[in-house]
Image (cartoon, rainbow, N blue to C red):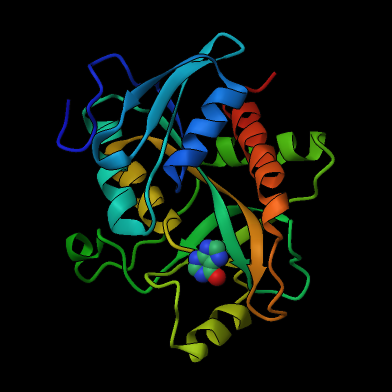
Amino acid sequence: MTVHIGAQPGDIAETVLMPGDPYRAKWAAETFLESAQCVNEVRGMLGFTGTYKGNPVTIHGSGMGMPSLSIYANELIRDFGAKTLIRIGSCGGMQPHVKIRDVIIAMTATSLNTPSMGLFKEVNFAPSADWPLLRAAVQAAEAMGQSPHVGGIYSSDVFYDERPDLTEQMTRHGILGVEMEAAELYTVAARLGARALAILTVSDHLQTGEALPSSERESSFGDMVQIALDAAFPA
Ligand code: HPA
């Protein structure tokens, strides 16, 4: 048990999928895993462990934003031995060719700030995905008939952004989408010797103002779970 995860040693698998929403973790575990058991419910942050094609998998919520994700990623890796962490989440589209429902696989995550920033001092660290995992996710998505966008994303500290100039700068520099967790996930994983990836569905668009209807959110979330599981356990 750690401060934020009530699981027993051995309850957490080496492969962990991390949606932001704990109820999404529950849905994904019940839908995709065999013999899923709840292993954490401290502060309502649900985690489940089961198997996928015989492989142990944990699906654990990260909460929203980098400070929340940082707590869980640190404890999962340091105290429970997680080795592969895959965020599955949503993002706002930032390029005209990136459409609602599209899948983005984040190669890098730019940010203004992360919880790790104090540690780096003058270093401008470049958080990046684990390459074999990223390649496997692209192959898994393509095998499902998707054409994922692969590139840089922006991990923001705010959902309600009051800096339109920042959005413009990110867009000018080819950033595909904005979310709130990946930069810290990539940084913590790098520091602690784990591998990490973020797979995102475009749920809204900063330029067009379009949003994914709530009726479609579950199926697009399910596609990301499938891509993540196939990437973690390639055939
Ligand atoms: N901003 C930040 N995070 C998000 C967004 C957004 O527009 N959409 C989904 N996650």
Compared to residue 31, the image places residue 197 above or below, namely below
Q: Is residue 153 visible?
A: no
Residue found farthest to the bottom: 165
Can you give x and y, in whole percent of width and height, for residue 90 in the image?
57, 56
Residue 215 shows in this picture: yes
At horizontal 48% and vertical 32% (from top left) the residue drawn is: 26
The residue positioned farthest toward the front in the image shown: 215
Would you say 53 lies left or right of 8 here? right
Residue at figure coordinates x 55%, y 41% from the top left: 131
**In the displayed structure, does residue 23 sit left or right of residue 125?**
right
- The quarter of the picture where the C terminus appears is top right
Give how far across and how far down residue 19 sits, in percent. 48, 43
Q: Residue at x 22, y 27 (%)?
A: 6
Q: Is residue 25 left or right of residue 95?
A: left
Q: Quick one: 182 or 121, which is closer to the camera?
A: 182
Q: Position of residue 67 (x, y in %)?
A: 28, 57
State whether residue 207 is above or below residue 100. below
Q: Residue at x 21, y 38 (%)?
A: 4
Residue 192 occupies which quadrant of the picture?
A: top left
- Taking the image as shown, residue 219 lies to the left or right of residue 145, namely left
Q: Nearer the viewer, residue 119 or 219?
A: 219
Q: Is residue 157 above or below residue 70?
A: below
Q: Nearer the viewer, residue 129 or 147?
A: 147
The image shows residue 71 at horizontal and vertical percentages of: 25, 46
